[in-house]
Amino acid sequence: DSGVTQTPKHLITATGQRVTLRCSPRSGDLSVYWYQQSLDQGLQFLIQYYNGEERAKGNILERFSAQQFPDLHSELNLSSLELGDSALYFCASSATDFSTDTQYFGPGTRLTVL
Amino acid sequence: EDKVVQSPLSLVVHEGDTVTLNCSYEVTNFRSLLWYKQEKKAPTFLFMLTSSGIEKKSGRLSSILDKKELFSILNITATQTGDSAVYLCAECGQGNLIFGKGTKLSVKP
């Protein structure tokens, strides 16, 4: 158990809908990262927040957004969902910046868009 | 575009064998290279490499980075069935983490 929690574990929804994925980092960690893992694209970095502020951005679609709250938990919002958004979404956390700290991954949320 | 390439894509060995997994990268503003093991769940961290030529070791696993030739290797000695997993390497550059597609290792008893 990494200490990173994600909810829900599974999510099934329809195209065009909007969902919110939630992540609580390990106690004391200030950075939260979101990743998408699909069969054809592999593991892709989406976005990083550090102490409430956006720190780095990867291949995140405009339909997706994230935020980190004062209690350091983070939410990833996915809107206007398409079939291709079906994937495993991981959250990871680290103490500070990921170039120097180990990232610990949560168990993931499996999103299925029908 | 920055790129991380892993080879081989898959590998089948028998228990006790030694394996070497490769990771090459092409990236600007390199900061570190990371290795992860992913079984049927979330990736778990193995190593972070920042300096050339310094081997990092953890039990039967070891890894080394060559910043001149832009590659890293992950060695696993005396493989066990529990080593069966997908091994991912990722390059950390300027504000981004780029993963390779992974090497799927299957260790047969």
Image (tube, grey):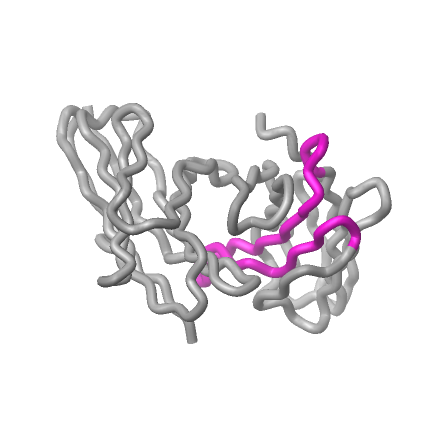
Left or right position of A37 against A25 = left
Q: Which residues are magenta?
A: A25-52
Magenta stretch, main secondary structure, is strand
Marks counted in the figure total 0
Left or right position of A44 against A106 = left
Observer-nearest residue: B55 or B72? B55
Observer-nearest residue: B53 or B18? B53
Observer-nearest residue: B40 or A70? A70
User: Where in the figure is residue A66, as x and y percent of width and height?
Assistant: 75, 58
Residue B17 drawn in magenta: no
In the rendered image, is residue A114 in sight? no
Quadrant of the frame with the N terminus of chain B: bottom left
User: Where in the figure is residue A2, as x and y percent of width and height?
Assistant: 58, 30
Hey, which quadrant is residue A54 in on the image?
bottom right
User: Where in the figure is residue A12, as x and y percent of width and height?
Assistant: 69, 50
Residue at image x 39%, y 49%? B50
On screen, residue B61 above or below A58:
above
Residue at image x 48%, y 55%? A43
Residue at image x 30%, y 48%? B103
Left or right position of B96 against A57 = left
Q: Residue furthest right?
A: A70
Residue at image x 71%, y 65%? A64
On screen, residue A111 above or below B30:
above
In the rendered image, is residue B89 in sight? yes
Q: Residue furthest bottom?
A: B1
Hey, which quadrant is residue A96 in on the image?
top right
User: Where in the figure is residue A57, as x and y percent of width and height?
Assistant: 63, 65
Quadrant of the frame with the C terminus of chain B: top left
On screen, residue B69 above or below B106:
below
Residue A51 drawn in magenta: yes
